[in-house]
Image: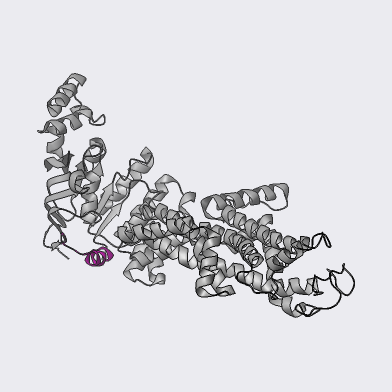
């Protein structure tokens, strides 16, 4: 799967962008040239050799704050995606096999979660569990889990009624065997697409929550938090929100590109696409003959 | 195993209903059939007559609401899911689907689909692969196809893989649901030859079809299923040359391949009128 994604230009670009972001998240806090929380008298300064991206309204170095905030932001969105994955995919697959009662209840829970207004729910959970990054991410993860539930359930339904699953049943295979061998491979590509998309959504959500002051507490920096405070000083530094906004956009874009690449290369259609590309590439390059019997995937 | 001539399959007064309460309807009623070792029985019926339900009931995929099913002398009609799984793992009864493309997982190489029943039984992978190769040769397929995906094979090759797949567990009874109706005539002959070899090797076959002509040449006995009941069960030659029930007569008369028995259009219309009366 990884090799197939990398065979597409869009896949390579997505992996490139996302690895830069991941590197930022790992190394960012140590790379920061200044203390991200250290204030100075030099407020709202423009870019200079000392402060590459200028300083904010408290005289803190913006570049350092961006680097230091990347870990929280990235970890937060990944956490959202993983919680949604666990809370959504497992009941989604099981709802097909565990009988009508389980199916009915999980479907109604998913409907309820979809119907809940996001912000009110987030604020209510914050009031209930206290303010903090894990609580906020858990809330968001649970709220987006119906997406995973439905995606996993739909693709499992398509497989569960298929003849090859019935053939495996007739050979005496257990539900676990069928799930591992036949269902998982079919459910994985759409779930991977949903996951990549959710990382993008998680980013926006983490950013907008810190914009509202939920989750990350000031003065701890996050990309969304930076964006929020920069917006307050637009008349002094009209260019300032562009940098955190660009970082957020790049991450979301990278995730979506990756999701597209995964969708393109998975399953039968993906194999056909890659084969036709390879054959076309060979035709342009006559030095390398096409082997008899077609191209192996 | 029963070398003593005990039937591989005995079905007595089988009843199957679908749906619940008011929507409950009868699909099979009072169906009885006995299949001996090495015998080939053709089950003929039109769409909706219950022939696939019959097969699914014997395989335990549909729960019978009455009657008894004995597989190799064992009464399986009250089996729990766990017992069914244990029985299926022994691979005594196997099933070949009509459409070989859909009965093989499109994302798994032929090898994996072929040896799956053995892996489920707990046979080691190495031994399973070896045995799988042997059965691929038996259905006259090159072992070079082992690593291919189902989509890269022709329809005839796929159906051979499906047959090889049910053979790996050395079943005593194979149920074939229209195994050749999706194939061209050359492949059809090829599959039918493989089935004849199986019969000679002592495997019992139940051949399900809507077309009497395709079964007439292979079956020892023929059972005609009409609206969920066996209206005629008997020696293949007797059913074809001297059908007694109007529906069986209509079937014989409508089979274009049984030219000697073909009835005129007027005769067929008369039989239809008799059936609907």
Residue at position x 12%, y 33% from top?
B243
Q: In the rendered image, which quarter is residue A34 located in?
A: bottom right
> Where does residue A219 sit, x and y in percent of width and height?
70, 76
Q: Residue furthest right?
A: A49
Quarter of the C terminus of chain A within the rendering: bottom right
**Rendered view: A134 above or below A271:** below
Q: Residue A29, percent across and down? A: 72, 78
Q: Quadrant of residue B113?
A: bottom left
Is residue A25 visible in the rendered structure shown here?
Answer: yes
Report x, y in % for residue A174: 33, 65
Left or right: A55 in relation to B143: right
Q: Position of residue B238 (x, y in %)?
A: 12, 37
| Residue occupying image coordinates x 18% and y 19% | B266
Indicate the quadrant containing the N terminus of chain A: top left, top right, bottom left or bottom right: bottom right
* B63 over A134 or under it: above or below: above
Toward the viewer: B67 or A191?
Answer: A191
Q: Which residues are magenta?
A: B76-89
Q: Determine the residue positioned at 36% across, 52% down.
A: A161
Confirm whether the magenta stretch covers residue B84. yes
Q: Is residue B144 visible?
A: no
Q: Nearer the viewer, residue B37 or B80?
A: B80
Identify the image's colour scheme: rainbow, by chain, secondary structure or one colour: one colour
| Residue A188 in the figure: left or right of residue A200 | left
Count of residue discs: 0
Residue most extreme to the top: B266
What secondary structure characterizes most of the magenta part? helix
> Would you place residue B234 above or below residue B199 in this image?
above
Q: Is residue A284 above or below residue B116?
A: above
Residue A117 lies within the magenta run: no
């Amino acid at each position: 799967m990884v090799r197939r994604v990398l065979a597409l230009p869009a896949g390579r670009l997505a992996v490139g962008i996302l690895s830069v972001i991941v590197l930022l998240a790992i190394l960012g806090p140590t790379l920061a040239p200044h203390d991200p929380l250290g204030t100075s008298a030099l407020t709202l300064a423009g870019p200079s050799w000392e402060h590459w991206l200028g300083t904010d309204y408290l005289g803190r170095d913006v570049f350092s704050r961006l680097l230091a905030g990347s870990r929280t932001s990235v970890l937060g969105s990944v956490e959202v995606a993983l919680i949604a994955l666990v809370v959504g995919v497992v009941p989604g697959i099981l709802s097909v096999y565990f009988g009508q009662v389980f199916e009915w209840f999980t479907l109604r829970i998913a409907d309820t979660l979809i119907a809940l207004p996001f912000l009110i729910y987030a604020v209510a959970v914050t009031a209930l569990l206290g303010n903090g990054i894990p609580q906020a991410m858990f809330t968001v993860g649970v709220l987006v889990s119906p997406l995973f539930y439905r995606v996993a359930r739909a693709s499992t339904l398509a497989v569960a009624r298929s003849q090859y699953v019935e053939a495996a049943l007739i050979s005496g295979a257990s539900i676990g065997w069928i799930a591992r061998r036949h269902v998982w491979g079919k459910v994985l590509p759409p779930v991977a697409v949903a996951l990549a998309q959710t990382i993008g959504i998680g980013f926006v959500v983490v950013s907008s929550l810190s914009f509202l002051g939920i989750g990350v507490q000031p003065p701890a920096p996050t990309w969304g938090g930076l964006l929020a405070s920069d917006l307050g000083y637009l008349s002094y530094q009209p260019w300032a929100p562009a940098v955190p906004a660009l970082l957020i956009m790049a991450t979301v874009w990278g995730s979506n590109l990756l999701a597209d690449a995964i969708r393109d290369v998975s399953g039968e259609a993906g194999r056909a696409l890659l084969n036709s590309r390879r054959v076309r590439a060979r035709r342009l390059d006559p030095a390398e003959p096409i082997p008899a019997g077609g191209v192996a995937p | 195993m029963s070398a003593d001539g005990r039937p591989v399959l005995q079905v007595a007064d089988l009843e199957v209903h679908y749906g619940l309460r008011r929507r409950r309807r009868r699909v099979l009623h009072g169906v009885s059939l006995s299949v001996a070792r090495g015998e080939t029985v053709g089950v003929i019926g039109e769409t909706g007559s219950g022939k696939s339900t019959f097969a699914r009931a014997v395989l335990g995929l549909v729960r019978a609401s009455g009657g008894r099913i004995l597989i190799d002398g064992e009464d399986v009609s009250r089996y729990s899911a766990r017992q069914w799984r244990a029985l299926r793992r022994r691979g005594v009864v196997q099933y070949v689907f009509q459409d070989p493309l859909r009965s093989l997982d499109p994302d798994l190489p032929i090898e994996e689909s072929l040896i799956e029943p053995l892996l489920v039984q707990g046979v080691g992978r190495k031994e399973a692969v070896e045995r799988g190769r042997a059965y691929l040769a038996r259905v006259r397929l090159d072992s070079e196809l082992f690593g291919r995906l189902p989509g890269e094979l022709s329809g005839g090759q796929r159906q051979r893989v499906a047959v090889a797949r049910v053979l790996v567990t050395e079943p005593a009874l194979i149920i074939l649901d229209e195994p050749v109706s999706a194939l061209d005539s050359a492949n059809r002959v090829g599959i039918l030859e493989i089935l004849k070899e199986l019969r000679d090797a002592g495997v019992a076959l139940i051949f399900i079809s809507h077309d009497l002509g395709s079964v007439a040449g292979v079956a020892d006995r023929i059972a005609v299923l009409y609206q969920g009941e066996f209206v005629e069960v008997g020696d293949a030659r007797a059913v074809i040359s001297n059908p007694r029930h109007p529906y069986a007569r209509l079937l014989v008369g409508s089979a274009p391949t049984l030219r000697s028995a073909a009835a005129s259009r007027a005769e067929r219309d008369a039989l239809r009128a008799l059936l609907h009366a």
